[in-house]
Image (spheres, rainbow, N blue to C red):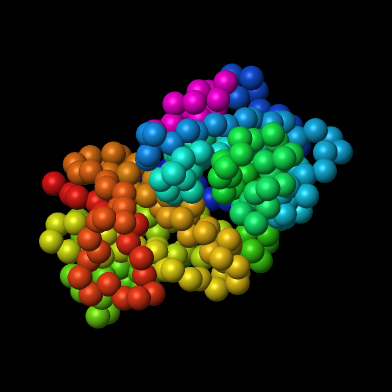
Amino acid sequence: MDLYQAILSRHSVRRYRNEPLDKETLAMIDDIAAHVRPLVPENRFRFMRRDVVSGEDLIAAMGGYGRVLTPPHYLVAYTVGDRAPLVDLGYRMEQICVQMVQLGVSVCFIGSLGREDNVRVRFRLTRGGRTGAFLIFGRAAETVTGRTINAVIRRTSGGATRLDPEDIFYDGAFDSPAVPPKHLAKLVDAGRRAPSANNAQPWRFLWRDGDLWLLLEKHHIRYGSSSVLQEYRYFDGGICMANLMMAMEALDMPGRLHLLGPADPSPEGLPDRLEPLARIILN
């Protein structure tokens, strides 16, 4: 499977074969995680791969664990740093996910925001590290029953649909959404296919003067009412950025991605409901 195909076909699997991956595949996954491309190089990234032990009570750590059946493995990853740690974490973990898909491995994120203190204690993580989500992985259950359960859980959790491109893309101004131009269609499609907590899809895209701006909704009802859960937009924004970066590589689109900071200007006319996250300068 090539890289762009893996980006588009990657989806959350909720029902797994109750058997571990072979040692060679696990070794390749460890190598992928160890050499994943950073968004913020100065941030520290750490991960641990764990096998699900029979009888292990993970529900306290993974609040959504009951919606995932018989997973054999999971990654606990975290970043430590002062600059956009959740964005950086999502950026790295989505790259790991997509490369797993290229290996034929199925994946699923289980969010951990709101339970980070418990996760740090349970797994003895560095104080101040941001966890964002667990990454469940293994082989999908390919029986008729397994595929049916996967489809039902994805549908009931709201993860089976995506917003149309014309609902999230602006061409030049924020007056009204538009269909992306042909030369951007595949890039935007890769971004909108990104997974997000409760399928919130907080991203919006602005094309202006040769730059593609990635913007996030400041508040999304699907994340919940607390300010901590609203931080999922940063983890999910990092995931979307990873899809964009990998798509540029796969489609041979020259350019660079710039993570915006407090001193960077925002696009003119930016609505109050949106905040800028990144700017992609395309050649």
Q: Which residues are magenta?
A: 27-37
Q: Tell me the chief SS of the magenta region.
A: helix
**Residue 226 percent location from the top left of the image:** 60, 68
Q: Nearer the viewer, residue 224 or 52?
A: 224
At x 54% / y 27%, what residue is drawn? 29
Position of 20 with respect to 45 (left or right) is right
Which quadrant of the rendered structure holds the N terminus? Answer: top left
**Residue 134's x, y, as percent?**
62, 44
In-front residue for pair 9/75: 75
Quarter of the rendering containing residue 205: bottom left
Residue 174 drawn above or below residue 116: below
Q: Quadrant of residue 199?
A: bottom right
- How far across and down, in percent of the image, does residue 31 sit? 50, 23
| Camera sees residue 162 | yes
| 34 in magenta | yes
- Residue closest to the far bottom: 175
Which residue is located at x 48 percent, y 60 percent? 233
Query: Is 190 a magenta residue?
Result: no
